[in-house]
Image: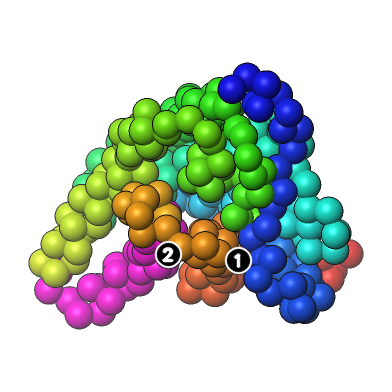
Amino acid sequence: MNISHTMITGFILSGFSGVTNHQVFLFPIFLCTYIITFCGNLTIIITYKLSPSLHTPMYFFLAHFAFLEILYVSCTVPKMLSDLLSECKVNSFSGCAIQMYCYLLFGGTECYMLAAMAYDRYNAICHPLLYTVIMSDITCIRHVVGSYVISAANALIHTAFTFSLPFCGSNEIDHFFCDVPPVLRLSCQDIWVNILVVFVIGGCVVIGSFIITIISYVEIISKILQLRSASGREKTFATCSSHLMVVTIFYGSVIFMYFRPKSSYKIGENAVVSLLYTVIAPLLNPFIYSLRNRDVKLNIKNIFLRLKEF
């Protein structure tokens, strides 16, 4: 077993091998997507930094979420772009482990950041008089730091358990990056412990943060429905609808990917499903949060006006 394990020095990523004839068209599409995602999220961060009126807990979390999106998409898409232009789509053993750790770290942190953003909206709408006390600066910082710490531990556990397995036979990963489920299927050892770790520990991160988010929005919607003014209900719900869209796309695709029976996996399906939360969601987030948010759009406009004066 150990000999077979040491013989593998790299993995072949074959996520888009089924569309070989179209890879020349996929490259410019994904390249443009990556550039737009990077610039869009960077715009949110810069707008937050340069706009004192946005220095509130809501936009503090949004700026950190945008920063996470840049890191999250950068640990998978550049390698995917390189592979689309290369005949040899190999990722070294250590490179695969590093990519998996970073992906799980940033993805897990996003889960808790979405939960923190939902908790922030809950306090703003349900406890407006105590909002500034509950969501103080130190509380917001603790939410962000806690998200990173919990996700770092989660990513380390999954990565260590996955790459402690012996790998033999095929080294071809049915994916465009080193994700846990497709890598586990290459092991020549029983992986029931790893599957249990995914469901139990991974479930605590994904499902746990998802439950917090859902509970927050149940309370928010209940509060909104109690408002007598129709315009008040519309305005309040508008501030939350953007977040709900992001939560639906992100959690829906992640839960489908990681928490379905092993027997339901289909060849090539991993790459298609993973595109939703690794590429599509980070692309849509800047537009959802900026184009649907009057304050963000106004401050972006003011920044451009100030730049023109120079």
Residue 51 location in percent, x, y? 62, 54
Q: Earlier in the sequence, mark 1 or mark 2?
A: 2
Quarter of image, res 164: top right
User: Viewer-proximal residue, 232 or 246?
Assistant: 246
Bounds of the magenta span?
A: 227-255
In the image, what residue type sits under mark 2?
Ile
Q: Residue at x 70, y 43 (%)?
A: 11
The residue under label 2 is: 249
Q: CA distance from mark 1 to mark 2?
A: 11 Å
Q: Residue at x 37, y 50 (%)?
A: 262
User: Viewer-proximal residue, 226 or 8?
Assistant: 8
Quarter of the picture containing the N terminus is top right
Quarter of image, res 256: bottom left
111 horizontally vs 89: left or right: left
Q: Is residue 268 magenta?
A: no
Q: Residue at x 42, y 45 (%)?
A: 111
Q: How is the image coloured?
A: rainbow
Q: Please tell me whether residue 38 is drawn above or below residue 117 in the rendered image.
A: below
Q: Residue at x 18, y 57 (%)?
A: 218
The residue under label 1 is: 283
In the image, what residue type sits under mark 1?
Leu
Q: Is residue 218 visible?
A: yes
Neighbour tally class for label 1: few under 14, some 14-19, many 20 plus, Cα within 10 Å: many
271 horizontally vs 304: left or right: left
Main structural element of the magenta stretch: helix, strand or loop? helix
Q: Please tell me whether residue 24 is drawn above or below residue 142 in the rendered image.
A: below
Q: Is residue 232 magenta?
A: yes
Q: Is residue 133 visible?
A: no
Residue 219, label in figure = none
Residue 276 location in percent, x, y? 51, 65
